[in-house]
Image (cartoon, helix red, strand yellow):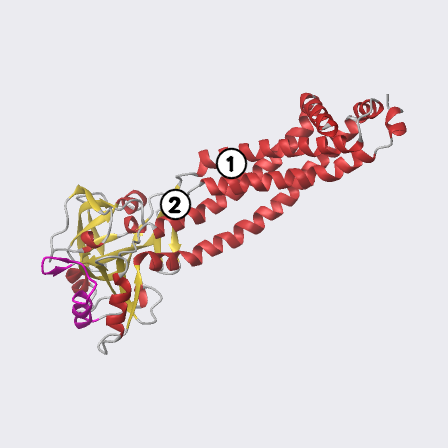
Amino acid sequence: MRSLKQVLAVSWLNIRNLPQRLGASLVAVIGVAAVVLVFAAVLSMAKGFERTMVSAGAEDTAIIMRSGATSEMNSGLSHEQMLIVANAPGVLRDGDTPLASAELYVIVDIPKKDTNEDANVPLRGVQQAAFEVRDNVEIVEGRMFEPGRNEFVVGRAAQDEFVGLDVGSTVRFGQTEWTVVGAFSAGGSVSESELWTDVRVLQDAYRRGNSYQSIRVKLTDEAALEELEDFLETDPRIDPDVMSERTYYSTQAEGLSRFIRLIGYPLTILMAIGAVFGALNSMYSSVSARGKEIATLRALGFGPFPVMVSTIVESTLLAAAGGLIGGAAAYLIFNGFRVSTLNGASFSQVVFDFAVTSDLLLQGIVAALIIGVIGGLFPAIRAARMPVAQALRQL
């Protein structure tokens, strides 16, 4: 109890005297704040990308592609196979009509608004059930495209990011002119980065015959996925890969998310090492400046342990302040910041928002506290080992 009281007393004294060491203290705080800011900013990109991708998927929606296909781009299914899938057990029906959408996926070049550079934007051909198969997709401006006409609806994110996609605009892809007749929202998911048109029109425009690349079906429930997969795998007319939409999009997000983390964590570690040296310098300066103070405390009967702990407490508090400042700055600057990037899995642009989540901020604060403890440890040991006689000579 006596040691605890001494720790509290010395720590409070250190905190009260911080204004006298303001310059060195600010160096430590700013260094840690920069670490947390960069950490949260870089990893919020991965978080935002994952959230945009995964939020497009549902466990009660299945996607069927050709066996071995890593994405819709390298998949292929025939009209006969589409009929087999649509009439398989486990597929939800609206009366006699299965809730299934056979789809085709092509890439078109559209300039970005900020740079005017061409970007790969997905133009997806869908069937009428596409809106029923997917959750949270609705027309928010204009109208739905009419089957058989060169019309498409655009996702809100794509409309905000790319040139010439206002409702009523006419754009040319290849030899074909298209009219933007509506815009849709999809809960901020990857679907908002796409343009949707009638699949039959897209097949004709790009000479794809009667082929598709994927089929999405609404399941009767989540457990029906296994029933559907078992049925299709036993049919010799189709060789499919069957998975839930959520699993598919999680797989699609892995590559870029892993790449961002491979950059983010080493960068944070390097900056953290610099912040540790900044904290060390600050706390060594603090111990040196407090020589008279430490001598007086030791002469009054304070032990080396309270002096050591109080130094670590001071360093940790400075680091915590830096962590809070860095986290707050990251949230205010980057959370919700919209960008687009190329998804290597589909070779198309995905528009997404940075997501500075609570777990990222918590990780940043923990990293700041670790920096504070390490940065204060060696100066604390020095303060505790300072001979009383030597310290008293400074009085």
| Of pointers 2 and 1, the one earlier in the residue sequence | 1
Provide the residue span drawn in magenta: 78-98
- Badge 1 crowding class, 10 Å Cα cut-off, few under 14, some 14 to 19, many 20 or more, is many
Q: Select label 2 or label 1 by which is in front.
A: 1
Q: Amino acid at mark 2?
A: Val
Query: Which residue shows up at 57% across the image and 38% down it?
Result: 34
Place residue 206 in its image quadrant. bottom left
Element at label 1? helix
Residue 117 can be seen in this image? no
Q: Is residue 44 left or right of residue 164?
A: right
Disc sitting over residue 339 in the figure: 2
- Using the image as rendered, state which of residue 363 and residue 73 is in the foreground: 363
Q: Which residue is mark 1?
A: 327
Residue 205 appears in the rendering: yes
Is 289 magenta? The answer is: no
Residue drawn where x is 49% and y is 43% of the image: 360
- In this rendering, the answer to whether 58 lies above or below 4 is below
The tally of labels here is 2
Q: Residue 39 in the image: x percent, y percent? A: 53, 44
Q: Position of residue 153 (x, y in %)?
A: 20, 49
Q: CA distance from mark 2 to mark 1?
A: 20 Å
